Image: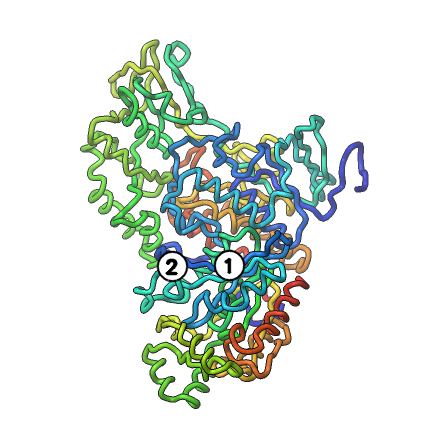
Amino acid sequence: MTGGFGPTTVMRRLDWASPPPRVHREVLSALPAEPTGKPPLLFVHGVAHGAWCFAEHWLPAAAERGFPAYAVSLRGHGGSGGARRLGRTTMREYVHDVLQTIAELPSRPVLVGHSMGGLIVQLVLERYQAKGGVLLAPAPLHGGARAFLSLAKDRPAQALRTAVGGTLPMTPEVLFEGLDPAEGERLSGRTGRESPIAQWQLLFPRTTGPIRTPVLVVGTPDDRLVPLADVERTARRYGVEPLLFPGIGHDLMLDAGQDGVLAAVLDWVDTL
Amino acid sequence: MADIGPGIEERAGAYAVIGAGMSGLASLKALLEAGFDADCYERESEVGGNWNIDARNSRIYRSIHLISSRPFTQYPDFPMPDTFADYPSHTEVLGYFKRYADHFGLREHIAFDHDVLRVEPVDGGARWDVTAEGPEGAPRTRRYDGVLIANGHNWSPKMPAYEGLDVFSGTVLHSKDYKDSDVLRGRRVLIVGGGNTGCDLAVEGAQNAAATYHSTRRGYYYNPKFVGGRPSDQVNDTLLMLRIPLAVRRLMYKATLRATVGSFDKLGLQKPDHEFGETHPVANSLLAYYLGHGDIQPKPEIRRFTAEGVEFTDGTSADVDVVVFCTGYLATFPFLADEHLNTADGRPRLYQNEFTPRHDNLFVVGLHQPDSGTFCLSHWQAVAAVRYLEAKRDRPEAARAFRAQVAAETDRQFTGGMRFTDSTRHYFEIAHQDFLAGVEQTIHQLEGAR
């Protein structure tokens, strides 16, 4: 194991004293026609997205390749409940939502987290040993200061709005590189709001206990939200080389070329 | 498989787990997760141990629910569904264990319907021979690198002796044989014991029997299951999180009890002869309710039984048809010689209720009576055992240092400042957070700097 991991956290006093409130949880899925013996995949979305962003292409495509594929909408997102409490929702509650979903699956899944979902997956992996973990353009565990500064340079007005609690910009220019404008508008129009607390939490560095799950890190040099240097640093933490897809935007599962990304992810999963 | 003796099967590199209840499942999972080979022996044909109500050795009854709420109780890496009640029923709990076993692929490593007869050291404990009897008949012996014992401590009944019990003409039961209220319906009932089972059964008596007498040796604190609409253990964990000192917490508990249950004296109960928290907590909101309705008549200790009924130490008597002794269970390890668990006066003396100073490849998981849930504690005990095995393999100097500590601090208590009443059911009583912080320390120590 490489450096950067703290000791195992056993004492979780806040979770014992005050568990997150129960909300309805949306889990979308696409299953292979016949059982294939392949591990289930559980996709976790990022800021202001929902399970829908994986249902668009990846769930059916993964099922086609024999994987039972699931995607969860974190509370306050997509078709899950909790929208009214979104303003008070914290990262801890998102971690809870993912652990709850895992416990419903028939066997140990491979967790695939995108952006903020990539950070959540790392926080889950310190508690739960999954079959594998895939981090797509992950929000960095070492804190999003660099990402925020780069956003402030490119889009000062939007950065300021985010700093005071607005949702990060989810416009087609930010999310996509090669999508035709109408499709970009349609998909970006499906994004919602994000919890300002969760967004602020993205800025601060964290550490995790030992992670014993094999991890794949995927990124793109053309990401306008998560800088390449952050993706590379995340990969170093796990002692792996990041898999890079130039020409694709931050939303690797929606942008043109997404099929190549999924194929590479599933090829890696097949080696586990 | 190499043959090393008449009929002994070599299981080099593998560990045996005894029991597939809440502690055995966690132990088996922790071993497999870390890449160790393991066989688990379970005498029933399903997982769940005590929570498998159809099992011969299950001691639970149809109305039972957890007395601690989900957040602390559950396995930390496999939470109970949010759709469960705050205090799940035994059917929910058993379903949870089944899904845990399936999710982590444990079943193929469990020998169901196998009764462990003997666990014996080879070469002074370098290896261990586990002899078990399965449905095929003849006992078989396998040789392991070590054993994790998770046989539970709530199955071997403790039965008190009373003068006249042999002449009593009514029905006498231990709660181990109590499954539902049919046996109480319409009859005059004496429930003996102020623990959680005793209180549950007194309530069932109030709801079903013609008359219910509840005999307790001492006064206890009967805690409501909810305070201010929240499960009371979560309220307690909030106070612990805020690091409120024990003395202040006790004042707050007593104030809460006065506000919710009221005065014990007024209900006719004995005043507790001990401080709050010094006996295993009783969580029961209904006992006080039925006392207040006169449907339960509180009684002190029994003096003797007569043919028709019972006499109490306060001079009163009652005619009863049924007596249920809710007098608890004893921890026993019938397959293992006492010395291996460092047993003195019938009590195993183990570091953190888990590590015996006698052997470094023999562990007990689940020998704890916390003031909260248990699955979480067994999970981390199992992780601690496995971290020790890893340290022994990868970092022998850290493992040796830990062994020295096990020997030196065997009797260290994790009671959060409480002085528990001394009895057979209290010697492994622990304060959940204090104990778990100790287990966390062990895990950190064995993980070392990576």
Residue A203 figure quarter: bottom left
- Check disc 1: other Cα within 10 Å, few if <14, some if 14-19, many if 20+: some
The answer to whether one can see residue A227 in this image is no
Q: CA distance from mark 2 to mark 1?
A: 32 Å
Residue under the point 71% across and 27% down: B138
Question: In this picture, is B382 found above or below A241?
Answer: above
Which x, y percent locates residue B309?
A: 31, 13
Residue under the point 34% across and 43% down: B277
Quadrant of image for the N terminus of chain A:
bottom right
Name the residue that disc number 2 marks.
A14
The answer to whether one can see residue B179 in this image is yes
Question: In this picture, is B443 found above or below A189?
Answer: above
Question: In this picture, is A23 found above or below B207?
Answer: below
Which x, y percent locates residue B232?
A: 31, 47
User: Is B421 on the left or on the right of A216, as rendered?
Assistant: left
Question: In this picture, is A53 found above or below B317?
Answer: below
For the residue labelled by badge 1, is the local secondary structure a helix, a strand or a loop? strand
Name the residue that disc number 1 marks.
A29
What is the chain letter for disc 2? A
User: Is A158 on the left or on the right of B330, as rendered?
Assistant: left
Amino acid type of the residue that numbered disc 1 sits on in the rendered structure: Ser
State which tag comes first along the sequence, 2 or 1.
2
Along the line of sight, which residue is nearer the eye, B150 or A164? A164
